[in-house]
Amino acid sequence: MDDSTVTVKSGRPDKWLLLIHQIPPKPDYFRVKVRRRLQRIGAVALKNSVYVLPSRSETLEDFHWLLREIVAEGGEATVCEAAFVEGISRNDLEGMFRAERDRDYAEVAVAAQALAAKDDTEIETDLGRLRRRVEEIMEIDYFSASGRRATEQALTTIESRLHAPAGRPGSRARRIEAMTGRTWVTRRDVFVDRIASAWLIRRFIDPKARFKFVGSKTYQPKPGEVRFDMFEAEYTHEGDRCTFETLLERAGLRDRALTAIAEIVHDIDCKDEKFGREEAAGVAALVRGIARGNPDDGARLERGASAFDDLYASLQ
């Protein structure tokens, strides 16, 4: 082998993938882009231009796409599979991967400590972001770094504090009970916030909830009716929160997947990219398809409920 190739020494038939690459000096941003991509896929540097991953179908695909980008920008890249290399053992390599992930987990743990000092009303959004970061690290934690347990415990402690019943025992149940047995009124031509809110109401607040669609923004509710996502409604946008977020807060629902859905709905409905949820574009496209294919509002709620059921399951 030439000096650009490193081999892994092991008594077992373990396989490793090596990316050997050379990046052109210009443009400067591309070198930074490649380095960040390598970090995101969890690759470890053996030399300046040689990175390693355990040999799996998904890691091979990661290296394959990165190779194509490097070559497209005028660089050179090779991916090879190695069974052994002089000078480094399997334990050494696994230790390098664990050390990288332990650093990642430690960053989250430090952020969690800072978060724990905040008031409960301020931390739920940041907690969701830290949870997503841990999930990203876990996807590239190929050899079970020891820092994961302490970091997850730190986040679980915060979650337990958030999930504790507010006020007297049973207060959350009383909140939800006060929201049941109603007809929920909203504007016609429902879209993402109203579709998602109706799903939340029927799935987590009142399975027997009834819905009514009206044309007037200033509709006055009749006895037994409650309005949502409309002018001066009982449940609507509050501050920078969308209606879904308002319902979640007022019902006292504490659920990581529901919080994630609230962030997605907010980003689509408020168009401010507050949470930067990567799922927002896909969910928005799906809801647009539901709206275009179903002029009837009741049908939109039915189709939307199936979509949000699946989204909820994927985020749990």
Image (tube, grey):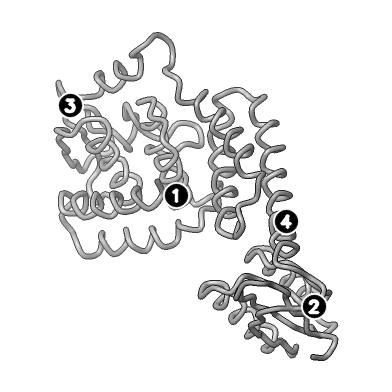
Closer to viewer: mark 1 or mark 3:
1
Residue at 72% in and 75% down: 8
Q: Nearer the viewer, mark 2 or mark 1?
A: 2
Q: Secondary structure at mark 1?
A: helix
Which residue occupies 28% across, 55% down?
A: 307
Which residue is at a point 26% across and 41% down the rendered structure image? Answer: 198
Give the quadrant of residue 186.
Answer: top left
Q: Callout 1: few (<14), some (14-19), or many (20+) C-alpha neighbours within 10 Å?
A: many
Query: Which quadrant does the N terminus fall into?
Result: bottom right
In front of the other: 267 or 87: 87
Q: Which of pointers 4 and 2 lies earlier in the amino acid sequence?
A: 2
- Number of marks drawn: 4
Say whether marks 4 and 3 touch (CB < 8 Å): no
> Closer to the observer: label 4 or label 2?
2
Q: Amino acid at mark 4?
A: Glu
Give the structural element (helix, strand or loop) at label 3: loop
* Tag of residue 182: 3
Q: Label 3 amino acid? A: Arg
Q: Would you say the residues marked 2 and 1 are in contact, meaning their CB atoms lie under 8 Å apart?
A: no
Q: Earlier in the sequence, mark 4 or mark 1?
A: 4
Indicate which disc residue 39 carries.
Answer: none
Secondary structure beneath label 4? helix
Q: Residues within 10 Å of mark 4 (few under 14, many from 20)?
A: some
The percent position of residue 316, horizontal first and vertical second, equals 40, 46
- Toward the top, the furthest residue is 168
| Mark earlier in primary sequence (2, 1) | 2
Q: Earlier in the sequence, mark 1 or mark 3?
A: 3
Q: Find disc 2 in the rendering and name its residue.
A: 86
Q: Amino acid at mark 1?
A: Ile
Badge 4 is on which residue?
100
Are discs 1 and 3 less than 8 Å apart at CB?
A: no
